[in-house]
Image (spheres, helix red, strand yellow):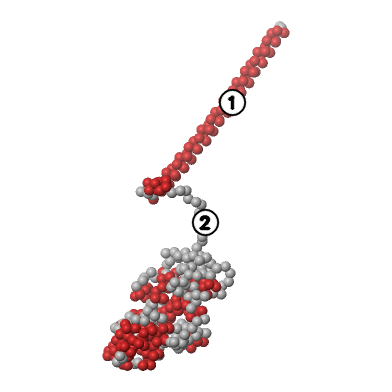
Amino acid sequence: MEKSAASRKSDAKKSAVKKTAAKETEAKETAAKETAAKETAAKETAAKETAAARKTAAGKTAAGKTAAGKTAGKTGAKSAAAKQVPPLKRQAPAKKPAVAPKKATAAVKGVAPAKTVAPKPPRGESRTALVRRARRINRELAEVYPYAHPELDFENPFQLVVATVLSAQTTDLRVNQTTPALFAKYPTPEDLAAAVPEEVEEILRPTGFFRAKTKSVIGLSKALTEDFGGEVPGRLEDLVKLPGVGRKTAFVVLGNAFGRPGITVDTHFQRLVRRWRWTEETDPDKIEAAVGALFPKSDWTDLSHHVIWHGRRICHARKPACGACPIAPLCPAYGEGETDPEKAKKLLKYEKGGFPGQRLKPPQAYLDAGGKPAPPLGAG
């Protein structure tokens, strides 16, 4: 039996209601799922952030403990000082230290290096590296001063030992200008041993400390006459027994009068080997031992000449001519003196600056190289 129109209409309404309810239920379930997913994601994000925060906090704590360990006992003082000190102004960038050029000579053109001290070489320079650097410096100086020689005029061992004693606290030039008159009047140890002290003092007056030097040269002359038959001994242990003769003087005599290797540790030598960090010793005997260990014994005498010549001509005590120095790339003290090449050139002394040398009668090799003999006493 067919349903009435009213019944069909009622069934349609019920079906529509059911569909609407089903859709609402499905929408609610979908919304619930999305909410749950968002909450889960939020929880995961929060967990990650918490873990990262804990890790960061742990790092800061460790760093704080380290810093606290280094600054223990200073926090209170710094806090008090901070209250009184005004905020710091912005500082200019630090200047870079001067670096020695590859080859610093007076002829170098261009911009001059900065006038600051070059960085020190690492304290951990190995023994092998030190030996190589020291020997290379000596080789470079040998090329610059191939004619290096003792700058005291002498014709025999007696004249050399006397001249070396007289060179204390004065220049070799002044000694060379004084000894011609001395040796003309007293040519042998026997003659000087019998001299009248006052007459010798008058001759030696220009050298300074002339009374003490007179006593020394007369005393050593008497010792040579009485103990060595008027001859200068060729052994270190005998030379140092003579009045006024120490190890430095003895090595000058041994190396230049007898051809026996020795290191002459004068003021120039001491200054330069410390600037080059060959040694930190200050006692002459210890310097002699330390430097001697860096070179073969056969190099000792010429090494002394090279270093002393360089100290007198370029690497001066007060204002070294760094800009004209041939060993600048090897020198840890580069920058202590004038680094501008043109200004440094004006600081050069003796033949390097066009001035006469210290000897009145220099070796021929020196003259052939353009060196000029010194003028005699009273000649200007």
In the structure shown, which secondary structural element does the residue marked by tag 1 occupy? helix
Depth order, front residue of 339/199: 199
Callout 1 amino acid: Ala
Residue 178: quarter of image: bottom left
Disc number lying in front (2 or 1) = 2
Query: Disc 1 designates what residue?
Result: 31
Question: Of all residues shown, which one is farthest toward the left?
Answer: 226
Q: Is residue 55 above or below residue 239?
A: above
Visible residue check, residue 103: no
Closer to the camera, 240 or 313? Answer: 313
Residue 168, percent from left and from top: 36, 80
* Inter-mark Cα distance, 2 to 1: 62 Å
Badge 1 local density, few (<14 within 10 Å), some, or many (20+)? Answer: few
Secondary structure found at label 2: loop
Amino acid under disc 2:
Pro
Up-down relation of residue 156 to residue 353 (above or below) = below
In this picture, residue 111 sits left or right of residue 379? right
Q: Earlier in the sequence, mark 2 or mark 1?
A: 1
On-image quarter of the N terminus = top right
**Mark carried by residue 93:** 2
Residue 241 at what x, y percent from top left? 29, 83
For label 2, the crowd category at 10 Å Cα-Cα, with few meaning under 14, some 14 to 19 and many 20 or more, is few
Residue at x 53% of width, y 67% of height: 113
Q: In the figure, is residue 67 to the left or right of 10?
A: left
**Rendering coords of residue 378 (x, y %):** 44, 87
At a point 51% along the width and 79% down the height, the residue shown is 353
Q: In the picture, residue 128 is in which quadrant?
A: bottom left
Identify the residue at horizontal 34%, vertical 83% (top origin).
Answer: 210
